[in-house]
Every structure is written in C-alpha cells, then in structure tokens.
Image (cartoon, grey):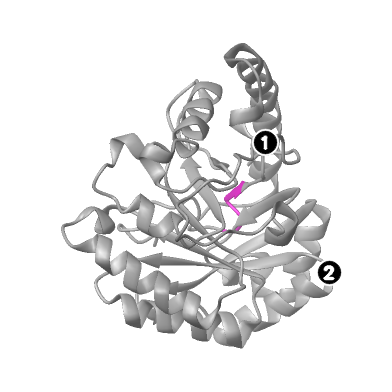
C-alpha cells in the first residue's frame, strides 16, 4: 500500500538522483500505510490458491495507489489508451479476495470500512480462469455499496490463457452484470509458456470488441526483463494502465525496487507500449 497522488512520468522526472529522493519519501509513506492496514485487517492465508501469488487471500491485505505516471507511448496500431482522469485510479486503493471474510460479508460495513480507510477505489476478484469467482449476490451488493459511497470498483481476474475465449467471456459477463468501473488482468507464469502470446491477443481482442471503452489494466511481474517470454507487448497494446507487483517481500530496498520497476515499464523495448504506472505494494506481514 502506498499513499499519494499521481506524479509526473518517469521520463519527465529529471535526474536519477531526484527520483531516488522522491522514492525515499514514498517509502516512508509505504511503511505508515502498512501499519494502518495491519491494524485494520486480519489475515487468513489458510486457503489461498497455490497458483495465485497475489497479495490477498484475506480481507484487504494488499493495496496500492497511483504513484508514477509514464508518458503513454505505443505502436500506431495499439489502443491510444485513456487519460489518468478517465482511468480513475487516483488516491489510495486496495485489492481484496474473499469478500465474505471482510466485515463478516456485510456490504454496507465493507463500504464503510473503505470510506473510513480513505480508499478511493477497490478491486474485488470476479473470475479465476474461465470461472466466475465469489458469491454473486455479495459481489453485487459490495459493488453497489462502494459505488454509492463514491468509490470506484474494479474487478480483477486471474487468467492462464488455456482457454482465452472462455476467460474473456466470463470477464465480460461479470463486468456487465456487476456494472464495474474497470477490469484488471492478473497474468503470471502460465503466460510464459510457448504459444501464449497468441492467447493473449485472442483474449484481449474479444474483450475490446465487447468493452471498447472500459478502463483495463495488467497486473504482473515487477521486472519485465526477468520474464522475456511473457507476452508484454500483446497485453500492453490493449490495456490502459500497468500495475507492476512490487511486493518486495523479505527485502529492505523498496525504493530501489520501485525505481527499477518503473524504469522497466517505461521501456518500450521491454513492454512494447508504455502506459500510466500504478505500482502495487505489499501490505501484509511477510518478512522484511
């Protein structure tokens, strides 16, 4: 979790020294946010899927806020992308996984917790592969309660690319039925397998044919250079925002990791299309 507003793009931030000073200041904010979240939410890791290395299998155990915005740049054939204002991820937000573990599954209480915590947007898991995720009634109630409180709500979806059309179909259905404000794609190692680049294109094309204007993002590895077989260009061509998972677990240099992550996501040679960057910080107690 981090607290702050969107800052100028990495390409326009001046010297490396200035960036490092800024990141050191941000690090202090990270620490404060971690403490607040630790006090507010009780972790429950007992049934977290082994294939989801995401930050929350427990109520509100991870979050993020827009910190750095890189200047959008892409191939002429790619989606122009949305402005920061149109994307709507400003202020502080949080990922959730098991809504029934948050405030006893009471939608009004969840919305109140989000308001009192200062969140401007919340992500709920809406699908896992080709299957819908969660209690449909609770998902709908939480969506309505958060939106009524003026909080943006996005759905996040763990995808594997094994059946991209089915995964796109369930995403479209969940987005439309719930009336979500945005959609986040959580893709990782499954998409590093041979042949998955075409799966990414198929998946994104189906999504965009049905939801051409919806804000979408990619949440994946912090360092694209470590994952050269991942289809970065294929995903980034269609999304509007990048959400690197800068969790820095069991590490003591979040400023260094964040700086490198932003730099790599700002490198056309690595990601194909540069989008506004919304780093995701770990907000749970694992080492470091």
Residue 61 magenta-drawn? yes
| Mark 1 to mark 2 CA distance (whole Å) | 25 Å
Q: Nearer the viewer, residue 110 or 6?
A: 6
On the picture, is 220 further left or further right than 258?
left
Identify the element where label 2 is drawn.
Answer: loop
Q: Residue at x 83, y 55 (%)?
A: 116
Q: Which mark is residue 269?
A: none
Q: Could you tell me which residue is drawn at 30 percent across and 57 percent down?
A: 50
The residue wearing badge 2 is 149
Q: Counting residues from the N terminus, which is met first, the one under dot 1 or under dot 2?
A: 1
Q: How crowded is mark 2: few (under 14 residues within 10 Å), some or many (20 or more)?
A: some
Query: Which residue, as the protein is rendered here, is positioned at the far top?
Result: 17
Q: Main secondary structure of the magenta part?
A: loop
In the displayed structure image, the side of residue 39 where residue 166 appears, left or right: left
Q: Is residue 264 left or right of residue 20?
A: left
Q: Where is residue 150 in the image (x, y as percent from the top left)?
A: 83, 67
| Residue 73 place in picture, x, y as percent | 53, 46
Q: Nearer the viewer, residue 198 or 35?
A: 198
For label 1, the residue is 35
User: From which residue to which does the magenta span run?
Assistant: 59-63
């Amino acid at each position: 979790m981090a607290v702050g507003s969107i800052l100028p793009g990495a390409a326009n931030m001046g010297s490396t020294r200035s960036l490092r000073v800024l990141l050191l200041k941000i690090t202090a904010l990270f620490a404060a946010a971690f403490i607040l979240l630790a006090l507010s939410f009780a972790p429950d890791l007992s049934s977290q899927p082994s294939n989801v290395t995401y930050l929350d299998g427990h109520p509100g155990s991870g979050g993020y806020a827009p910190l750095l915005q890189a200047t959008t740049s892409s191939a002429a054939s790619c989606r122009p992308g949305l402005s920061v204002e149109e994307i709507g991820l400003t202020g502080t937000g949080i990922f959730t996984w098991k809504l029934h573990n948050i405030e006893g599954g009471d939608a009004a209480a969840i919305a109140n917790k989000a308001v009192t915590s200062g969140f401007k947007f919340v992500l709920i898991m809406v699908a896992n592969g080709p299957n819908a995720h969660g209690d449909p009634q609770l998902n709908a109630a939480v969506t309505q309660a958060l939106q009524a409180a003026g909080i943006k709500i996005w759905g996040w979806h763990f995808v594997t690319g094994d059946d991209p059309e089915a995964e796109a179909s369930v995403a479209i259905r969940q987005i439309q039925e719930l009336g979500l404000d945005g959609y986040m794609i959580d893709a990782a190692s499954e998409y590093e397998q041979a042949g998955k680049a075409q799966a990414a294109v198929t998946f994104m094309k189906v999504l965009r044919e049905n939801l051409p204007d919806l804000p979408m993002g990619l949440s994946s590895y912090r360092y694209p250079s470590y994952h050269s077989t991942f289809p970065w260009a294929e995903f980034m061509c269609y999304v509007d925002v990048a959400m690197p998972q800068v969790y820095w677990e069991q590490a003591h240099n979040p400023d260094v990791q964040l700086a490198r992550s932003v730099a790599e996501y700002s490198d056309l040679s690595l990601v194909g299309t540069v989008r506004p960057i919304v780093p995701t910080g770990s907000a749970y107690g694992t080492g470091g």
